[in-house]
Image (tube, rainbow, N blue to C red):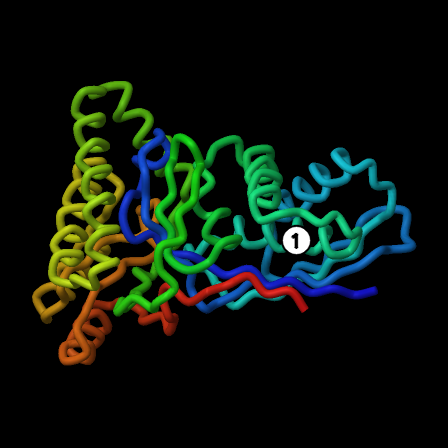
Amino acid sequence: MAISVSAPGKLMILGEHAVVYGYPCIVSSVDKYLTVKGGRSFDKNDTFVTGKIRDTSFIKSAIDIIRNKYKLKERIFLETESDLGEYGLGSSAAVTVATVKLLNELFGLSLTNQEAFELSYKAVLQAQKKGSGFDVASCIFGGTIYFDGKSKEVDVFSHDPLPIIVGFSGNKGDTMIMIEKVAELKKKKQKLVEEIFNSIGKLVGQGKRAICKKDWQRLGKLMNDDHQLLIKLGVSNNKLNQLVGEAVRAGAYGAKLSGAGGGDCMIALVSDENRAKVEAAIRNAGGELINVEVGKGTLINY
């Protein structure tokens, strides 16, 4: 029996890096997906056909976690397809969640979303040692969520699309390098970093209220403020700053890097009237526009 599960990518709206230390964040799923297809295998070993996904550690970790918990002996065949690209849209979390959900369907485990989150998060930690779980939660619950970095509680507070343009900086970021960079800064300047984290946490709470009210001017200002705090953490770079600046000058309500930084994506919150101008500004500054709808991704089993 072959089963397919598609998990959505994600974009961080507010709360980068602080979430690793227990602060909240806001993250939205996007309508680009990573799909895992598979079933039982008659080979002696698990078999993976992963195409452009070179790192299979997250798949192996997910299978290992499920196999040990439920005492499964069957071998697995898995094949992956992805339209998340190399943009930093959360492919590691997506492939982990899709694998867990596929095994759930294949072996009739009847996992709740909360149980799937806990197992997927455990698999991510086993594969990469660090992580807050917000990306896993985004894949599983979809929409736009408020994620508590300390309790890991999830509040899905919107399923409406956000008026956001996404631009790729042209360089792939390395999440773990950026996390370690912030950790080193925290060792040297603990008080400063904790003040930045507290400020980011306050922006997240205000951002949730702004999104609920569709107060885009307010949300845009919060995004601008968040980007400045991320600059202070040392995780932005000249290209991201340039793309963010050009977007704001072209009429965006606000803009910021999205994700761990060091490369990958920036996001710009725009009105319908200024969308074309902001898109042109991002392109003219050397950014690549990514055609996604932010806040509309959802987990798909078929």
Secondary element type, mark 1 = helix
Quadrant of the image occupied by residue 233: top left
In this view, the residue in front, 104 or 193, is: 104
Relative vertical location of residue 247 with respect to residue 46 in this rendering, above or below: below
Q: Is residue 214 above or below residue 74?
A: below
Residue pictured at 29% horizontal, 53% vertical: 13
Tell me the residue that label 1 is attached to.
101
Residue visible at 41% across and 42% down in the picture: 175
> Can you give x and y, in whole percent of width and height, for residue 72 in the image?
83, 41
Counting labels gives: 1
Q: Residue at x 37, y 31 (%)?
A: 180
Q: Position of residue 217 (x, y in %)?
A: 11, 62
Image quadrant for the N terminus? Answer: bottom right
Picture quadrant of residue 147: top left
Task: State which quarter of the image contains the C terminus.
Answer: bottom right
Camera-side residue of 121 and 278: 121
Q: Nearer the viewer, residue 104 or 213?
A: 213
Horizontal relation, residue 198 to residue 82: left or right: left
Q: Residues within 10 Å of mark 1 (few under 14, many from 20)?
A: many
User: From the viewer's perspective, is residue 99 above or below residue 62?
Assistant: below
Q: Position of residue 247 (x, y in %)?
A: 16, 66
The spot of residue 84 in percent (x, y) is 49, 63
The residue at the point 62 percent across, 55 percent down is 98
Q: Of the residues shown, which amino acid type is indicated by label 1?
A: Lys
Q: Is residue 148 left or right of residue 164?
A: right
Left or right, residue 161 beside residue 7: left
